[in-house]
């Protein structure tokens, strides 16, 4: 089945991974999506458990879409395993294979003794035969790209899988560092786990700062917080440091600020309807209840008119940050100007 969102994708992939550990496989897997973490996780589990080490020489074939065609994959998939229960055929970067759709000829009647894994970036056309034939005879994993506001919630859940509680602020900081790259969060978490004291059960902002090498003090996350509370001196200080960072990109900063003020706007609209339960607030905002105090302050400091003005200002600086009518101002200058403009609304 194809998933409808990252929660469903996570649940589905856990089931597939557990089946692989138990030696349960389907004849065809189509692993696709804009976020590669889950497709690659499933592919890795299948490759790890489908064959014994001594069976791999004759029964495992791994190839790449740019180097093969459908005829080669079909011929390989139709072979019978040698001295093993099954053979494994893995097609990586399948989106690069020009004849990909022709694999439907095999997927309409796949062999039970072959496990064919089709791993691709992007999504297959759901109207065409390949997608339909795998849907009927195999498994489809569709992994959506998470939105930035979904990352902290995903991170908290991921850490719980590791037996750890992560501070919501630490999850937000890690999310800012990794963006929407779930694989990067997993890699950074792996490094962090090696450095935590034995028996540790929680992860703090200090742990993230120390082990991931990022600072809360000078981050977009800290800038949005300072703006929410209208802490002008701190906001301008953070903006100056963030803007002068080696990898700073104005469009990304504007995008983060836009998301923040859009959430303020949604929160104000929600509160205008009367008392609202915390679970409803969390669902609408896409943030942990830990941050409600900040958003309460932000709604007070940026009523509707000012919030709309801030969003309008962000649109102006998005244009400037992409090279439009900014004169000789550097990206750092633009971020400080933008921050000052918001504070003066």
Image (cartoon, grey):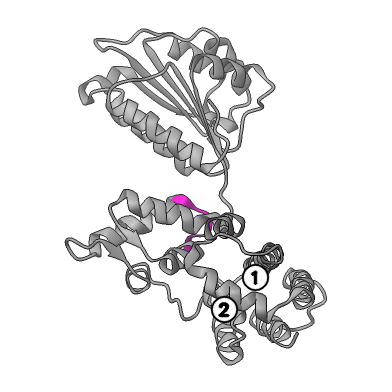
**Does residue 280 appear in the picture of this structure?**
yes
Mark 1–mark 2 CB contact (< 8 Å): yes
Q: Residue 135's spot in the image, x, y percent?
A: 55, 19
Quick one: which residue is furthest to the front in this view? 275
Which mark is on residue 257?
Answer: 1
Question: What's drawn in magenta, residue-wise?
Answer: 177-182
Compared with 26, 67 (above or below) is below
Compared with 73, 341 (above or below) is below
* Residue at the image position 49 percent from the left and 64 percent from the top: 289
**Does residue 120 appear in the picture of this structure?**
no
Instruction: Compute the Cα span from label 1 to label 2.
Output: 9 Å
Q: Secondary structure at mark 2?
A: helix
Image check: 298 left or right of 200? right
Q: Which residue is mark 2?
A: 223
Q: Residue 333's spot in the image, x, y percent?
A: 67, 84
Front position in the image: 129 or 12: 12
* Residue at the image position 44 percent from the left and 69 percent from the top: 169
Q: Secondary structure at mark 1?
A: helix
* Residue at the image position 77 percent from the left and 69 percent from the top: 315
Q: Residue 261's spot in the image, x, y percent?
A: 67, 69
User: Which corner quadrant of the image does residue 187 belong to?
Assistant: bottom left
């Amino acid at each position: 089945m194809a998933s409808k969102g990252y929660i469903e994708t996570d649940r589905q992939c856990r089931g597939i991974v557990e089946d692989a550990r138990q030696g349960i496989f389907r004849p065809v897997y189509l692993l696709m999506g804009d976020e590669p973490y889950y497709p690659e996780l499933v592919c890795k589990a299948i490759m790890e458990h489908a064959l014994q080490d001594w069976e791999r020489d004759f029964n495992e074939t791994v190839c790449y879409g740019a180097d093969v065609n459908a005829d080669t994959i079909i011929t390989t998939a139709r072979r019978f395993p040698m001295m093993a229960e099954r053979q494994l055929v893995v097609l990586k970067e399948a989106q690069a294979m020009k004849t990909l759709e022709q694999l439907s000829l095999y997927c309409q009647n796949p062999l039970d003794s072959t496990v064919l894994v089709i791993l691709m970036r992007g999504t297959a056309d759901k109207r065409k035969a390949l997608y339909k034939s795998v849907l009927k005879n195999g498994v489809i994993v569709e992994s959506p790209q998470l939105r930035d506001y979904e990352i902290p919630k995903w991170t908290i859940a991921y850490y719980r899988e590791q037996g750890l509680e992560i501070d919501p602020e630490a999850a937000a900081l890690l999310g800012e560092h990794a963006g929407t790259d779930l694989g990067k969060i997993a890699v950074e978490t792996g490094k962090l786990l090696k450095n935590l004291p034995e028996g540790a059960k929680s992860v703090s902002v200090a742990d993230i700062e120390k082990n991931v090498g990022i600072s809360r003090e000078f981050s977009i996350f800290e800038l949005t917080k300072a703006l929410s509370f209208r802490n002008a001196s701190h906001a301008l200080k953070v903006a100056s440091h963030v803007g002068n960072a080696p990898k700073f990109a104005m469009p990304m900063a504007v995008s983060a600020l836009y998301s923040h003020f859009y959430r303020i706007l949604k929160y104000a609209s929600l509160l205008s309807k009367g008392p609202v339960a915390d679970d409803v607030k969390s669902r609408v905002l896409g943030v942990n209840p830990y941050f409600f105090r900040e958003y309460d302050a932000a709604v007070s400091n940026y009523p509707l008119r000012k919030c709309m003005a801030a969003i309008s200002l962000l649109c102006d600086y998005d244009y400037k940050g992409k090279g439009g009518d900014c004169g000789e101002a550097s990206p750092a200058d633009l971020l400080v100007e933008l921050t000052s403009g918001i504070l003066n609304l």
